[in-house]
Amino acid sequence: MDSSSKTETPATGSYKTTPRTRMRRLPKRAHYDRETVHGILDAGFVCHVGYAIDGQPYVTPTTYWRHEDRVYWHGSSASRMLRNIAAGVPVCFTVTHIDGFVMARSGFHHSVNYRSVMALGVAQAVTDAAEKEQALDAFIERLFPGRTGELRPSTKQELKGTLVVGMDLAEVSAKVRTGPPVDDEPDYALPVWAGVLPIRTTFGPPESDPLLAPGIPVPDYLAGFALDTK
C-alpha cells in the first residue's frame, strides 16, 4: 500500500533496542527488524498517538503514513494535540492489526493473533511549504498511487491551515502473535472445539459522489481495490 516503499531501498537491519523498547513479557513475540516493523506500519493507515498535556494523558486516533525511517501524521493547524506535539511533547505512537480470535479449550488460554508496533520519540512540525505539500501528496499516493496527478494543487491557505508532524523511528519495536491456541497438555483431550477465527480487512465497491459530473469513470487504481493486511 505504501507507494513510497516502491522506490525505497528494501528495509534491512534492526532498530536498536533500548530499556524502553525491550520486551520483557513474552519476549519471543518481539521483533526489532525493519522488515517486520515497516511491514506492519505499511499494512495500516490508523495509528494511536499518546501524549500528556499539563499532566493529563491523551490518546488520539489519526491517519498516518511512513517514509523510510520516519512516520507522519497531520490535521488542522488549530489542533491542540498537534500544536502541543509540535512543541516537543514526548509521544507514544502505536499501530495494531487484529488478525484473529484464538479460541482455546479453557478461558484462560483464549488469545488474539495480532501485529503491533510501538514507537517512542518527539515529533517535529514540517514547516517548509514545499516539503509539507510533498508530504501530504505522499500520504494520498500511499493509498491511491497516481491520484495526486488528477487533483488541483493545494492552496496556500489550505497548507497554512494544515499541520504536518513527523517522527523518526528510533526507539521502536514490534510484537506479533500467530498460530493456534496453546493449551495445557491435559486439555487437548477435551471435547471442546479449538482454533482460530480469522479477521480480515476488506473494501466494498467504490460509491460515486451523487454530485459527480457525468461521464467520469471509476479510476483504474480503485478497480479491484483491496487492502492486504497479511
Image: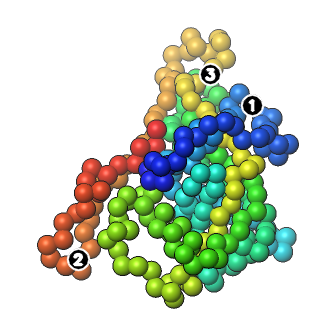
Disc number placed over residue 138 in the picture, else none: none
Marked residue nearer the N-terminal end (3 or 1):
1
Can I make out residue 100 in this image? yes
The residue under the point 85% across, 42% down is 19
Query: Which quarter of the figure has residue 103?
Result: top right
* Residue most extreme to the bottom: 157
**C-alpha separation, residue under disc 2 versus residue under disc 3:** 53 Å
Percent of width and height locating residue 205: 26, 56
**C-alpha separation, residue under disc 3 versus residue under disc 1:** 16 Å
Q: Which residue is mark 2?
A: 212
Q: Which residue is mark 3?
A: 182
**C-alpha separation, residue under disc 2 versus residue under disc 1:** 52 Å
The residue under the point 53% across, 36% down is 101
Q: Which residue type carries mark 2?
A: Leu
Percent of width and height locating residue 129: 57, 78
Mark 2 element type: loop
Percent of width and height locating residue 146: 35, 61
Mark 3 element type: loop
Can I make out residue 111 in this image? no
Local packing at callout 2 (Cα closer than 10 Å; few below 14, some 14-19, many 20+) is few
The residue under the point 48% across, 63% down is 138
Q: Which residue type carries mark 3?
A: Val
Percent of width and height locating residue 169: 69, 52
Residue 73, compared with residue 38, is above or below; it is below
Mark 1 element type: helix
Residue 91, compared with residue 3, is above or below; it is below
Q: Is residue 104 left or right of residue 85?
A: left
Marked residue nearer the N-terminal end (2 or 1):
1
Q: For marks 2 and 3, give the one nearer the viewer.
A: 2
Residue 27, compared with residue 123, is above or below; it is above
Q: Which residue is mark 1?
A: 27
